[in-house]
Amino acid sequence: MLRFTVVTIFPQMLDSALGHSILHKAREKGLIEIDMVDLRNYTTDRHRTTDDSPYGGGQGMVMKPEPLVTAIEDIRGKTGGARVILLTPRGRVLSQQDAHRLAQEKELVLICGRYEGIDERVGAFVDEEISIGDYTLSGGEPAAHVIIDAVSRLIPGVLGNEDSAADESFVDGLLEYPQYTRPEDFRGMKVPQVLISGDHQRIESWRREKSVEITRERRPDLLAGASFSTAEKVREKEIKSYVYVEIMHYTD
Ligand code: SAM
């Protein structure tokens, strides 16, 4: 069982998002637990203040360190070895490998920022800083949802079919092959013959080939981290030299 604790000033914000489909079933089966913790419970003033104006001036407000650090220390004290993650656009961008690594944990604490961000000193109290991509969200809550989803589906028993997580994009460093369902002919676009051939070996190698091809076209940066068989490496080299010859021919 993996317990996620989300520290936020909007504890109700993810209720609906986390209460459906796979995550809902995973919670019901006791495979994951999600606790939403209201940061305002860790304030000490009458107005339950969590933010203040930035030193040095500038736009907006900054989240104060005291409530956040008190919350982190309290949750750490209650849970033992919780791994505390600060959600920030300045963090390392979440990858599938990170999701696998985090799925091994027992307790994850996700700290959601708001406003202009969080007092820098809070960084000294967390285990790591994660971003979900190179763009700015209004708050850490959607990022917490993304992490909970990506991590939970890797926990054994969460997906109905144990194989579905093994087959997807990024698992072996490649994007997924194209998928089709009925009808066989949709507005003149036919399902590739090989998929209706019933020949499982051919289907498997077609899928692998398509995975490599799509990754090469759309995310060539991923190829460096992917694992290839010797035969595939030879083929890649042939393709590269073919492309090189074609380019030379074109520029002549
Ligand atoms: N001023 C901050 C900056 O430029 O880095 C952005 C603050 S943002 C408006 C408010 C909060 O949203 C952040 O503290 C963080 O918790 C969350 N957030 C925004 N973008 C994010 C991203 N790409 N990944 C994870 N969390 C993000």
Image (cartoon, grey):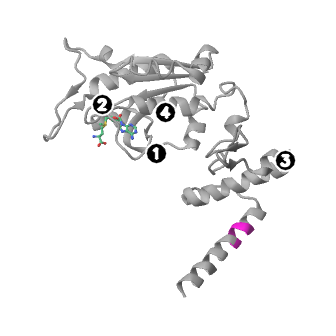
Q: Could you tell which of marks 1 and 3 lies nearer the N-terminus?
A: 1
Start-end of magenta stretch: 234-238
Task: Answer with mark 1 or mark 2, whichever residue precedes in sequence.
Answer: 1
Q: Residue at x 73, y 31 (%)?
A: 162
Question: Pointer 1: residues within 10 angstroms few (<14), some, or many (20+)?
Answer: some
Mark toward the start of the polypeptide (4 vs 3): 4
* Outermost top residue: 46
Residue type pointed to by label 4? Val
Mark before the other along the chain sequence, 4 or 2: 2
Q: Secondary structure at mark 2?
A: loop
Q: CA distance from mark 1 to mark 4?
A: 12 Å
Some atom of ligand 1 lies within 8 Å of the CB belonging to the residue at label 2: yes
Quadrant the N terminus occupies: top right
Task: Identify residue for label 2.
Answer: 114
Tell me the SS state at disc 1: strand
Which mark lies nearer to you, 1 or 3?
A: 3
Quadrant holding ligand 1?
A: top left
**Which residue bears the numbered disc 1?**
93
Q: Secondary structure at mark 4?
A: helix
Contact (Cβ within 8 Å) of mark 1 with mark 3: no
Tag on residue 197? 3
Tell me which amino acid carries mark 1: Val
Q: Please, which residue is most extreme toward the left here?
A: 57
